[in-house]
Image (cartoon, rainbow, N blue to C red):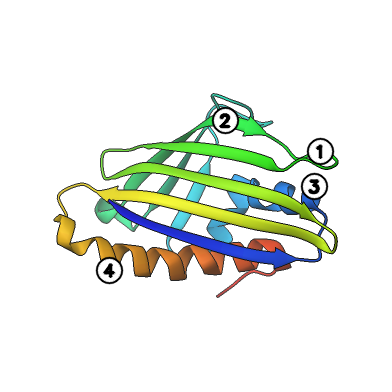
Amino acid sequence: MAVFRIERFTALPAAESWRRVTDWERHCAHVPLTRITVPTGLPTTIGTVFVARTGVGPLAFDDPMEVVRWMPPVTGRAGLCRLEKRGSVVLGRASIDVYPTDSGSHVVWVEELRIRLLPQWGDPLIAGTGRRLFGRVLDGLLDGTVRP
């Protein structure tokens, strides 16, 4: 299983960082050839499912994820979100934690991924690629820009 961790510090308050990084549909603005739908509807809570569809035409695949823990930040307490990846191609889990700091917030995103049919020796490549891709997503969500 490929595991990677991304951390960012931002001047945004924890509640705003949380709002941005858990706005699932905005993630696709930073991931090429991907769109995200939330078939269970909003607002997000435990049991919410969202699906990232990546690719073009017959070369696309779905990456459904379910929220299994949802605890938004409140004054003095971190926000914790846990996701289970339940797809036929991408499996694993993710956690997004948002900690309040004196100067804003600290966001920690950890992914544990397994790509079905890819051998375990490819995990370092998947982790490196994931770290770059998800780092770009996190940067874009926190600074509010859309990346080309």
Q: Which amino acid type is marked by label 3?
A: Ala
CA gap between label 3 and label 1 equals 7 Å
Which is closer to the viewer, label 4 or label 1?
A: 1
Please, what secondary structure does the residue beneath circle 4 have?
A: helix
Residue 112 or residue 35, whichever sits in front: 112
Q: Indicate the position of residue 77 as horizontal and vertical percent values.
A: 77, 40
Q: Which residue is mark 3?
A: 15
Local packing at callout 3 (Cα closer than 10 Å; few below 14, some 14-19, many 20+) is some
Q: Earlier in the sequence, mark 4 or mark 3?
A: 3
Residue 52 or residue 80, whichever sits in front: 80
Please, what secondary structure does the residue beneath circle 3 have?
A: helix
CA gap between label 3 and label 2 equals 17 Å
Q: Earlier in the sequence, mark 4 or mark 2?
A: 2
Q: Which amino acid type is marked by label 4?
A: Leu
Marker disc for residue 125: 4
Q: Quadrant of residue 72?
A: top right
Please, what secondary structure does the residue beneath circle 2 have?
A: strand
Image point 44% across, 66% down: which residue?
Answer: 131
Q: CB atoms at circles 1 and 2 under 8 Å apart?
A: no
Marker disc for residue 69: 2
Vertical position of residue 40 compared to residue 121: above or below: above
Q: Is residue 38 visible?
A: yes
Residue 140 or residue 148, whichever sits in front: 140
Q: Indicate the position of residue 58 as horizontal and vertical percent values.
A: 25, 51
Q: Earlier in the sequence, mark 1 or mark 2?
A: 2
